[in-house]
Image (cartoon, rainbow, N blue to C red):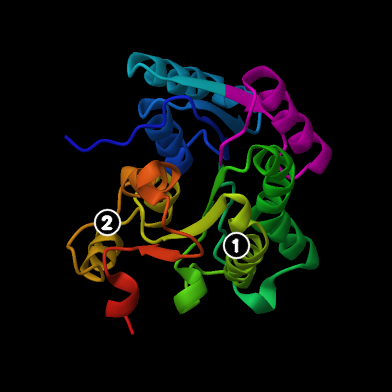
């Protein structure tokens, strides 16, 4: 039987406590990786964090929460260095932190732009910068960036979100050019219409959801595990010949809508 085996690997999931990120945390832990995932540290979410850790353990895996502001470069560096001290290496980095607030360009403030870029792109930069030293030392690393189909079709409802995710593509290209020969492979996954709490809130009306599903050729919305399984694949030996790729996980919606 074919299986994804990440036994002995250490992973950091930036933004790994809810939605797609939580599913990535569970899938990596379930495949045998030791997973550290960041979250904001909001006390209101403590029960959810505890349940995520427990679910990973019930599946035979290990997921350790880290309350870190992923927009803080020194804090991210300290987190990565702590993982390396404790575990010996940081093998897998998944950059998933982000937020999309639909709003028109003409009504957007400078502060909203800066906040979105910091969250959707800056967190990936700080995560990569923190993880790279250990990966270079070990001549091994798997970096998976979670982007958005907005880089292809301009969707998502906000110029800042589309711009930040497009910035991730440039980041991936740079990393492949400079680090692939050092054993560090980088790819980006572009989700679209994934049924998270945020999407459910945005499309709360049944008719709006029906119209959204009608745009997807496979006939359903995406699930967080659709993205998480792909991330786990790329992090595993099955992904050892994949580098510098943008992978649309959208049920065919992007090309169907052209």
Query: For residue 221, which numbered disc appears in the image?
Result: 2
- Which badge, 1 or 2, is on the more N-terminal residue? 1
Coordinates of residue 149 in the picture (x, y in percent): 44, 68
Nearest the eye: 222 or 168: 168
In the figure, 74 relative to 41: above or below? below
Rendered location of residue 202, percent (x, y): 43, 56
The quadrant in which residue 28 appears is: top left
Q: In front here: 120 or 9?
A: 9
In the image, farthest residue toward the bottom: 258
Residue that mark 1 sits on: 176
**Residue shown at the point (41%, 47%) measured from the top left:** 231
Mark in the foreground, 1 or 2? 1
Identify the image quadrant of the C terminus: bottom left
Q: Secondary structure at mark 2?
A: loop
Q: Is residue 219 visible?
A: yes
Q: Is residue 87 magenta?
A: yes
In the rendered image, residue 84 lying in the magenta stretch gets the answer yes
Q: Is residue 151 above or below residue 47?
A: below
């Amino acid at each position: 039987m074919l299986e994804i085996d990440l036994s002995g690997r250490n992973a950091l999931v930036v933004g790994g406590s809810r939605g797609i990120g939580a599913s990535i945390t569970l899938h990596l832990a379930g495949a045998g990786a030791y997973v550290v995932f960041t979250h904001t540290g909001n006390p209101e979410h403590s029960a959810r964090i505890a349940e995520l850790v427990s679910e990973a353990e019930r599946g035979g895996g290990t997921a350790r929460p880290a309350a870190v502001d992923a927009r803080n470069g020194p804090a991210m560096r300290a987190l990565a260095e702590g993982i390396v001290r404790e575990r010996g290496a940081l093998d897998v980095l998944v950059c998933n932190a982000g937020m999309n607030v639909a709003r028109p360009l003409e009504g957007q403030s400078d502060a909203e732009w800066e906040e979105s870029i910091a969250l959707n792109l800056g967190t990936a930069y700080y995560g990569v910068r923190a993880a790279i030293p250990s990966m270079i030392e070990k001549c091994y690393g798997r970096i998976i960036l979670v982007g958005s189909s907005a880089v292809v079709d301009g969707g998502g409802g906000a110029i800042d979100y589309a711009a930040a995710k497009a910035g991730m593509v440039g980041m991936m290209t740079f990393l492949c050019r400079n680090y692939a020969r050092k054993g560090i492979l980088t790819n980006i996954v572009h989700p679209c219409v994934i049924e998270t709490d945020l999407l459910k809130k945005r499309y709360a009306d049944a008719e709006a959801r029906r119209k959204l599903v009608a745009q997807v050729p496979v006939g359903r919305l995406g699930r967080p595990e659709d993205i998480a399984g792909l991330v786990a694949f790329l992090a595993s030996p099955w992904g050892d010949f994949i580098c510098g790729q943008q992978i649309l996980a959208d049920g065919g919606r992007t090309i169907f809508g052209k």
